Image (spheres, grey):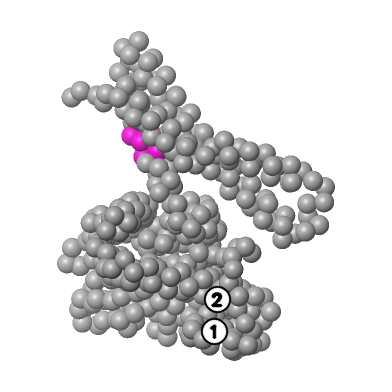
Amino acid sequence: MAGPDYDTEIKQLRATLRTIEQVLDVDAMNAEIGALQEQVAAPDLWDDQENATRVTGRLSLLQGELDRFTSIRGRVDDLEVMVELGREEGDADTLAEAERELGKVKKAVESLEIRTLLSGEYDAREALVTIRSGAGGVDAADFAEMLMRMYTRWAEHHKYSVEVFDTSYAEEAGLKSATFAVHAPYAYGTLSVEAGTHRLVRISPFDNQGRRQTSFAAVEVVPVLEQTDEIEVDENDIKVDVYRSSGPGGQSVNTTDSAVRLTHIPTGTVVSCQNEKSQLQNKAAAMIVLKAKLLALKKAEEEAQLKELKGDVAASWGDQMRNYVLNPYQIVKDLRTGYESGNPQAVFGGEIDDFLEAGIRWRRGAEKAGAEA
């Protein structure tokens, strides 16, 4: 069997990288990195801890992005050299290694290309994810916990940190709801395609008769706010409730009323936080979540008004978006993109990058179709 056309493949990879370089604006990235490095070197940087955190965080984000791009470009250069050596020496082993590396590099370039599709207003932000159990009783609560584990393991695979704000446990098993942040660049743009209703079909481990059960869980994804975001919240519009934190089975994890629930009266938005040790810390964390959800609500209202002005757009973003079937056969299928996997265990173990990439490409196509309508 003939090997790949290396010349054509490498030429295409370089063309794609040039496009990515333009979209990322690598020159501007280098300039900003230089300016941030000067600020980091200033002896009084940590006099203002909030600004120092922002500066060092931005520097880390940009440096990581630049290193990723530079590394992949270097791998393409190395691949070209490997192919030339294999051809010159007639070394079948070297060419076989080049073919394996070609597949890996193509995948890396495709993943980097996905980043260029995340150009929405808040896509570069960190993500705030809320999972709620839906219809299906204890199976739905267990499913909600499975989804939370799936996303946290995905984050672990990528070495992204996760901060849990609130977990509300169900009585028998699983979660009623959970809210957590994924601290990583473009986490919102990437995970926002997960928003919607997820459906699980399996033999229920909680049914003594071993019947098949269908259960549902809802996933909400909003961007984490920054100081520059304009979202004012009147303290008079907020109802504050405090209560005692608890863990699975009602076990007390805190002997004081440190957990905080905030209700935004005008919109009815409710958020909770119980994972910090003090009531003050929990209230501050809950306010972060509340503002993020209010910003998302504001954006949704603006988009709804725009859609009303433009009329109905074909290929709208459906609510129920993915099925996880464990019985009578095993498959995970995205209902919008058609992408599927026959290995649900791997998916629940955090291997969801292919679903995320398919969702991002699908969304970009839907946005283009909407703009042309």
* Residue 290: mark in rendering: 2
Quadrant of the drawing holding the C terminus: bottom left
Please provide percent x and percent y for residue 197.
32, 71
Which x, y percent locates residue 241? 59, 89
Q: Percent x, y for residue 93? A: 33, 21
Q: What residue do we see at 43% from left, 42% from top?
A: 112
- Mark 2 or mark 1, earlier in chain: 1
Residue 264 bears which disc, if any? 1
Which residue is farthest front? Answer: 309
Image position of 183 with respect to 219: above or below: above
Give the left or right position of residue 297, taking residue 28 as reference. Answer: left
Q: Residue at x 32, y 21 (%)?
A: 7
In which quadrant is the N terminus drawn? top left
Query: Residue 251, can we see it?
Result: no
Q: What is the magenta segment's predominant secondary structure?
A: helix
**Up/down of 273 relative to 99, above or below:** below
Q: Is residue 234 above or below residue 153?
A: below
Residue at position x 37%, y 63% in the image:
194
Q: Nearer the viewer, residue 218 or 137?
A: 218
Q: Which residues are magenta?
A: 102-109
Q: Quadrant of residue 101?
A: top left
Q: Is residue 135 magenta?
A: no
Q: Mark 2 near mark 1, Cβ–Cβ under 8 Å?
A: yes
Q: Per the image, is 103 magenta? A: yes
Give the numbered dot on residue 320: none
Estimate the spatial distance between the alpha carbons at disc 2 and disc 1, rounded to whole Å. 8 Å
Relative to 204, say whether 163 is above or below.
above
Image spot of residue 51 (x, y percent): 72, 57
Q: Amino acid at mark 1?
A: His
- Give the quarter of the image for residue 286: bottom right
Foreground residue among 198 and 302:
302
